[in-house]
Image (tube, rainbow, N blue to C red):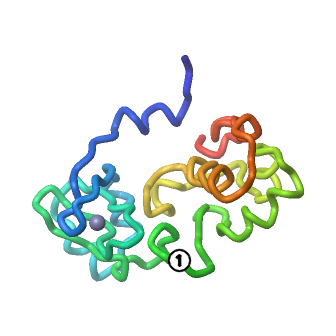
């Protein structure tokens, strides 16, 4: 089965508990950490293996194999999965917020159309713009499924069909 660009996400998944909250975080590339952290923080990056804590209630954003932590406030972007008030960024490459997604679903009720309307097509730089370092389409899918009365069949479009990852 060809899963295109999204298949390597599971291959490189390696979980390690966050030293602060204990929730399992996912590996994230050093280039992501370097791009997201404020310049003064990224200078201290000596290690190569990093994880991202996606627990919305934890103040830690990244941590390294030695247990060094980098906080949400060390990021130069607003981290959508750590904030509860608008704006809640979801697609960092195209400046799409959770509110945009909720507001546009009714107009389309089709996942691929939704991505089109939101402008989530073409070039993406998820690796350096998204604090998770990966494509945002899974996050959008989750929002549509959890917050709206979407039928799972309406949201089967893979991110690769929009070429957003290429
Ligand atoms: Zn944590």
Find residue 41 and report its horizontal and vertical position in percent: 27, 78
Q: Residues within 10 Å of mark 1 (few under 14, many from 20)?
A: few
Question: Which residue is most to the left?
Answer: 66
In the rendered structure, the answer to whether residue 97 lies left or right of residue 72 reads: right
Which image quadrant shows ligand 1?
A: bottom left
Asked if residue 72 lies left or right of residue 64, the reply is right
Q: Kindly identify which residue carries mark 1.
A: 84
Residue 16 spot, x, y in % from top left: 22, 50
Residue at x 57%, y 47% (from the top left corner): 138
Q: Position of residue 52 (x, y in %)?
A: 33, 59
Q: Which residue is at a point 57% across and 81% down the rendered structure image? A: 85
Towards the viewer: 43 or 162: 162
For the residue pair 45 and 11, the one nearer the viewer reads as 11
Task: Label 1, secondary structure: give it.
Answer: loop
Badge 1 residue CB within 8 Å of ligand 1: no
Quadrant of the image containing the C terminus: top right
Outermost top residue? 1
Whether residue 87 sits left or right of residue 134 in the image: it is right
Q: Residue furthest right?
A: 107
Q: Is 73 in front, or is 144? A: 144
Give the side of residue 96 with respect to residue 130, left or right. right
Disc count in the image? 1
Residue drawn at x 44%, y 72% as measured from the top left: 82
Q: Name which residue lies at 57% across and 53% down.
A: 139
Q: In the picture, which quadrant includes the N terminus?
A: top right
Residue 109, horizontal then vertical, whole percent:
83, 48
Q: Which residue is at the front of the view, 48 or 24?
A: 24
């Amino acid at each position: 089965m060809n899963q295109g660009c999204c298949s390597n996400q599971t291959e490189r998944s390696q979980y390690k508990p966050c030293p602060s909250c204990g929730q399992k975080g996912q590996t994230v590339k050093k280039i992501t950490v370097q791009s997201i952290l404020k310049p003064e923080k990224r200078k201290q990056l000596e290690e190569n293996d990093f994880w991202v804590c996606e627990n919305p209630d934890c103040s830690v954003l990244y941590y390294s194999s030695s247990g060094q932590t980098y906080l949400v406030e060390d990021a130069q972007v607003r981290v959508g999965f750590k904030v509860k008030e608008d704006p809640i960024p979801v697609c960092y490459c195209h400046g799409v917020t959770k509110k945009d997604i909720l507001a546009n679903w009714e107009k389309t009720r089709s996942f691929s159309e939704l991505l089109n309307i939101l402008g989530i097509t073409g070039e993406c730089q998820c690796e350096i713009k998204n604090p998770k370092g990966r494509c945002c389409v899974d996050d959008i899918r989750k929002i549509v499924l959890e917050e709206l009365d979407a039928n799972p069949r309406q949201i089967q479009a893979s991110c690769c069909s929009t070429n957003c990852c290429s």
